[in-house]
Image (cartoon, rainbow, N blue to C red):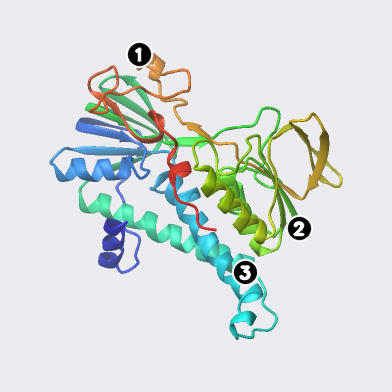
Amino acid sequence: MQCIRSALLSTRGRLLPVRSLSSSTISDSDLVVIGSGPGGYVAAIKAAQLGLKTVCVEKGATFGGTCLNVGCIPSKALLNNSHYYHAAKHEFASRGIKIDNVEVDLPAMMKAKDTSVSALTGGIAGLFKKNGITSVHGHGTIVTPNQVIVKNNDGGRTTINTKNILIATGSEVTPFPGIEVDEETIVSSTGALSLKEIPKTMTLIGAGVIGVELGSVWQRLGAKVTAVEFLGNIGGVGIDLEVAKSFQRSLQKQGMKFKLNTKVLSAERTPDGIKVVAENKKGKQEELVSDVLLVCIGRRPFISGLGLDNIGVTVDNRGKIPVNERFQTNIKNIYAIGDVIDGPCWRTRRKTKV
């Protein structure tokens, strides 16, 4: 984060232009980094600083990956600002501060979130320019161990010949079988960051760190939130159970409700809202109807369309890429880092503030 702040200071808030190529060939690169999230952009910058001719391929319009665009940064912005609102509405009076008619201006809150995101992604663009990194915006596919072909976002195509490839494509939302996400009334964590209005009621499928983080935002802003969790604790697999209990009590004080040891059987749109049918461990079923359903059962490696099968890169049964202590795959000049290798996905490793 410090390097991003430095770039912002040096550009005085301006977003620096980044070189983009279309329908062309890059013949002599030393390293192609696929993905510009916290792993990819740092690796690209360091490689360039060490003298490698570096190309970064990013499928999104801006750099930073999930974390900066639709993950850690925007969620923390909403967490912080919803905390201010909740404190002003429910806590200030007990501290001797009287404020009348406290209201949420949701468009302004979303604009503040977007401003934070734009500043940081623009900072990465500035660092790429400063370090001479070539950027290609589009979806990259590895066709040989020394060549990546990018389907550019502008419709063209870029062929990149390279000595080494680093896969840093991160993770994507794990879908729930039988539930179609439209990012409006049935949303993933991405859609939950950009709701156009505060729902009166919200149901969460999954009470891991991502679910309770975003659920707590909308709870503080006025929604009645109920989380349905298959496990017997919140926070996901591996969390310290004492921490989970304390965490749950804190959220319950804010008004969130939890149905633990409960599995979701189905979800459907009805005239009254999104109906979820759930069943607890005793076999008792119940229906939950809400304005918005947030599906947040975890994340999985994003390797779709990378062409790993074409070149024989090994992938395990969880979609992870095995690597050695130098982050090499089974093909010695192809490396992988971040969420595509073994270990919990980055967003589930981030600390949650509630």
Which SS class for mark 1? Answer: loop
Find the residue positioned furthest to the right. 271
User: Mark 3 falls on what kind of element?
Assistant: helix
First in residue order: circle 2 vs circle 1: 2
The one of 43 and 346 positioned closer to us in this rendering: 346
Q: Is residue 61 above or below residue 114?
A: above
Q: Please tell me how crowded label 2 is: few (under 14), some (14-19), or many (20+) other residues with Cα within 10 Å.
A: some
Residue indicated by mark 1: 312
Residue flagged by tag 1: what amino acid is it?
Answer: Gly
On the rendered image, what quadrant is the N terminus found in?
bottom left
Outermost residue toward the left?
51
User: Residues at badges 3 and 1 in contact (C-beta under 8 Å)?
Assistant: no
Residue 252, x across and y down, in percent:
66, 56
Q: Quadrant of residue 254?
A: bottom right
Q: Dividing the image into 4 quarters, which one contains the C terminus?
A: bottom right
The image shows residue 256 at horizontal and vertical percentages of 68, 54
In this rendering, position of residue 217 left or right of residue 55: right
Q: Residue at x 86, y 45 (%)?
A: 271
Q: Which mark is residue 200?
A: 2
| Badge 2 or badge 3: first in the primary sequence | 3
